[in-house]
């Protein structure tokens, strides 16, 4: 009887041991509300964002295709550039854009220069209707005929091709209805879009709060199963209510979330609006926030989900072997050293082929920034 009890206790202990530390990974990662695996083991952890940033904020702009000129866009760009940050500008490829901007080489050159300097130019538009998600549209007939394309997809393709012809290949698309976008998101993914951003309708009131049913998902980008494309929820315009923007971004920052702002660019003609945006950026920088474009954030997020790191000891050196199976580098990834039981003094970071990425003395700050290259650099 005693032997049976001892065997049972040993079995339970072993089961708890493996559940607590399967392959060196720390339990509790899957319970996190953040929909990307926190990579960590007994010795190190990898931050969710680069360079030790606590959260991410994306400043997006719309409305340049409806105004008289691009002067508000220039004001936004000068402000962001002077602050050392970047953002995303959504353009609607309609008749106004084609006639007013696309035929003006000065404006085309400006947009191209913005794109080449990490001010993302992405595609804005509306393809949805009340019938987009209905059975009537998407149900195949009894003989198994292929499903018809969602309404508006041809318009999206045409707009994308037109932007490409101007040297402005968009990697993101902004629509106005998340639930109705579901049938079209796989097609956007197939066309090469990195993300879909659910925007608010036009008008100041609509840019002050998300749709009621998005309250619990706006915090982080979301994947559609089996696809690379990410879904984002646009949240707020800081030039409408600066105090509320600070409050919301503070709440999101404490949860390491993503805060997407939409600024109606024609409003930046007003000096007061521009000043409010300037104050908001200053506030974000004080909060250790990564201010980036949606393209930059999407690329980072897709790679961050896939990177793996294993740690082992070699005398007094901690060897960290990483695997980045994507084609995109993870720049300035922040590695944190935990309280180490072994008297480690040095570290070495290398890829699975033994190619070194970084090495040195473990700093007093207990963290380093290192670029994790793709499995096949240059591919």
Image (tube, rainbow, N blue to C red):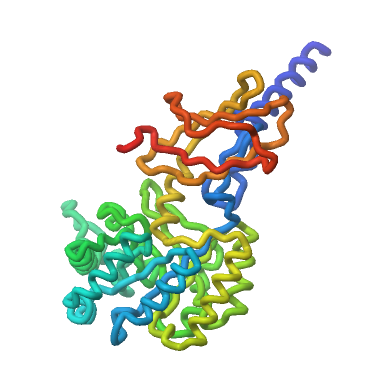
Tag count: 0
* x, y percent for residue 125: 30, 72
Q: Is residue 310 visible?
A: no
Q: Is residue 72 positioned above or below 351 on the image?
A: below
Q: Residue at x 40, y 82 (%)?
A: 202
Q: Quadrant of the C terminus?
A: top left
Q: Nearer the viewer, residue 56 or 366?
A: 366
Query: As drawn, is 229 to the left or to the right of 144?
Result: right
Q: Quadrant of residue 149?
A: bottom left
Q: Residue at x 35, y 35 (%)?
A: 377
* x, y percent for residue 52: 59, 50
Q: Quadrant of residue 362?
A: top right
Q: Is residue 341 positioned above or below 255 on the image?
A: above
Q: Nearer the viewer, residue 206 or 39?
A: 39
Q: Quadrant of residue 11?
A: top right
* x, y percent for residue 197: 40, 65
Q: Residue at x 62, y 36 (%)?
A: 44
Query: As drawn, is 311 to the left or to the right of 225?
Result: right
Q: Is residue 177 positioned above or below 169 on the image?
A: below
Q: Quadrant of the N terminus?
A: top right
Q: Is residue 275 visible?
A: yes
Furthest-right residue in this view: 2
* x, y percent for residue 305: 47, 44
Q: Residue at x 50, y 77 (%)?
A: 237
Q: Nearer the viewer, residue 68 or 9?
A: 68
């Amino acid at each position: 009887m005693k032997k049976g009890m001892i065997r049972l206790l040993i079995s339970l202990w072993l089961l708890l041991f493996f559940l607590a530390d399967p392959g060196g990974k720390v339990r509790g990662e899957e319970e996190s509300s953040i929909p990307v695996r926190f990579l960590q083991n007994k010795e190190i952890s990898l931050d969710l964002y680069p360079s030790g940033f606590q959260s991410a904020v994306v400043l997006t702009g719309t409305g340049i295709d409806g105004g008289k000129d691009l002067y508000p866009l220039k004001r936004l760009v000068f402000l962001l550039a002077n602050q050392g940050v970047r953002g995303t500008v959504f353009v609607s490829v309609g008749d106004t854009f084609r006639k007013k901007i696309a035929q003006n080489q000065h404006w085309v050159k400006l947009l191209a220069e913005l794109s080449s300097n990490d001010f993302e130019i992405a595609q804005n538009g509306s393809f949805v209707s009340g019938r987009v998600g209905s059975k009537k549209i998407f149900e195949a007939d009894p003989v198994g005929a292929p499903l018809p394309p969602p309404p508006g997809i041809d318009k999206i393709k045409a707009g994308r091709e037109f932007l490409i012809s101007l040297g402005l290949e968009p990697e993101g698309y902004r629509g106005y209805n998340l639930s109705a976008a579901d049938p079209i998101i796989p097609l956007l993914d197939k066309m090469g879009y990195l993300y879909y951003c659910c925007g608010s309708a036009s008008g100041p009131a609509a840019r002050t709060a998300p749709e009621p049913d998005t309250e619990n998902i706006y915090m982080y980008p979301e994947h559609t199963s089996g696809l690379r494309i990410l879904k984002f929820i646009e949240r707020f315009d800081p030039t409408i209510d600066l105090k509320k923007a600070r409050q919301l971004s503070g709440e999101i920052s404490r949860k390491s979330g993503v805060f997407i702002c939409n600024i109606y660019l024609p409003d930046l003609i007003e000096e007061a609006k521009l000043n409010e945006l300037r104050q908001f950026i200053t506030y974000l920088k004080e909060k250790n926030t990564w201010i980036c474009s949606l393209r930059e954030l999407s690329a980072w997020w897709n790679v961050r989900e896939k990177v793996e790191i294993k740690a082992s000891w070699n005398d007094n050196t901690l060897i960290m072997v990483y695997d980045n199976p994507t084609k995109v580098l993870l720049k300035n990834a922040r590695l944190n050293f935990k309280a180490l039981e072994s008297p480690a003094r040095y570290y070495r970071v290398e890829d699975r082929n033994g190619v070194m990425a970084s090495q040195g003395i473990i700093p007093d700050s207990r963290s380093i920034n290192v670029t994790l290259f793709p499995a096949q650099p240059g591919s």
